[in-house]
Amino acid sequence: MTDDAARTNDTIQSLVRGLAVIRAFDADHSELTLSEVARRADITRAAAGRFLRTLEELGYVRGSAGSGVGRTFGLTPRVLELGFSYLSALSIPEIVQPHLERLSREVDESVSAAVLDGGDIVYIARVPTRRIMSVRITIGTRFPAFATSMGRVLLAGMPDAALDALLAASVLPSLTERTVTDAAELRGELDRVRAQGWALVDGELEPGLRSVAVPLHDRRGDVVAAVNVSTSATRDSVEHVLERHLPALRETAAAIDAELRLV
């Protein structure tokens, strides 16, 4: 084996063992002696001692006063940096998906997340329960933002100047007999959505489709995505959507926002 290969192999093993030392600590074992760390990490006492001293110097481990057999060690809050690095690498769909799955089970309806791309929404996550539209919705499906609940909370989250410019350049076709196609009326609706923090769209994208949406925010408070619950007008009244689905949706959005503030 060459010197470079030997060093590479040694580095990999050191990383594996160092992580094993960190994982030796948990809620039931927050304080461990050197011997306990060695046993739980399945390494020698000498190796455990080297890793603990290194982690202590880096600030990830703190040791009790004194020395010898009775000295104990514990992790410091700095280890949270390692988890933060992981969360920072996550994308919005990865963060959103498990929350959508829980929400769908709670309300027994299809739930989705989308982002704004020009005048369209683009689906980035979805949990379908039953087919309620004539078209099949998948990740990447696009719809006109102005006629959708998620689109309206995303448009309402834009700065006024950018929103005015987008609406001025947009065509507002009549998709159903309920679709709002007047720019002034739409702008008034978006102002209401911005003030109340949610949007309900009833049969404007497709007849019989009823959905409610709320925005998602990043750590600066900017609207970066939206989540919704979609249902059939024949199955759920507007009152039921607002009384049952909207509170669950808002609770889910708050949980997602809390995670998005970490990335």
Image: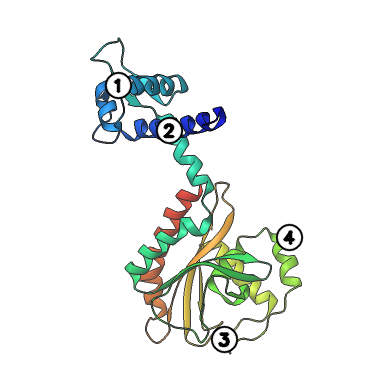
- The alpha-carbon separation of the residues under discs 2 and 4 comes to 56 Å
Q: Which residue is mark 1?
A: 45
The foreground one among 147 and 2 is 2
* Separation (CA) of disc 3 from disc 2: 65 Å
Q: Position of residue 149 (x, y in %)?
A: 53, 72
Give the mark, 3 or 2, whose residue is nearer the N terminus. Answer: 2
Q: Nearer the viewer, residue 62 or 156?
A: 62
Q: Is residue 6 above or below residue 70?
A: below
Measured Cα–Cα span from mark 3 to mark 4? 27 Å
Q: Tag 1's secondary structure?
A: helix
The amino acid type, in three-letter code, at marker 2 is Gln
- At numbered mark 3, what does the secondary structure look like: helix, strand or loop? loop
Q: Which residue is mark 2?
A: 13
Measure the C-alpha gap from mark 2 to mark 1: 16 Å
For marks 3 and 1, give the one nearer the viewer.
Answer: 1
Disc 4 marks a residue whose amino acid type is Ala
Q: From the top left corner, tell me how far across and down residue 130 is, in percent.
A: 39, 80
- Packing grade of label 1 (10 A; few <14, some 14-19, many >=20) is some
Residue 226 visible in the displayed image:
yes
Q: Say whether marks 3 and 4 touch (CB < 8 Å).
A: no
Q: Which mark is residue 161?
A: 4
What residue type is disc 3 on? Arg
Which structural element holds mark 4?
A: helix
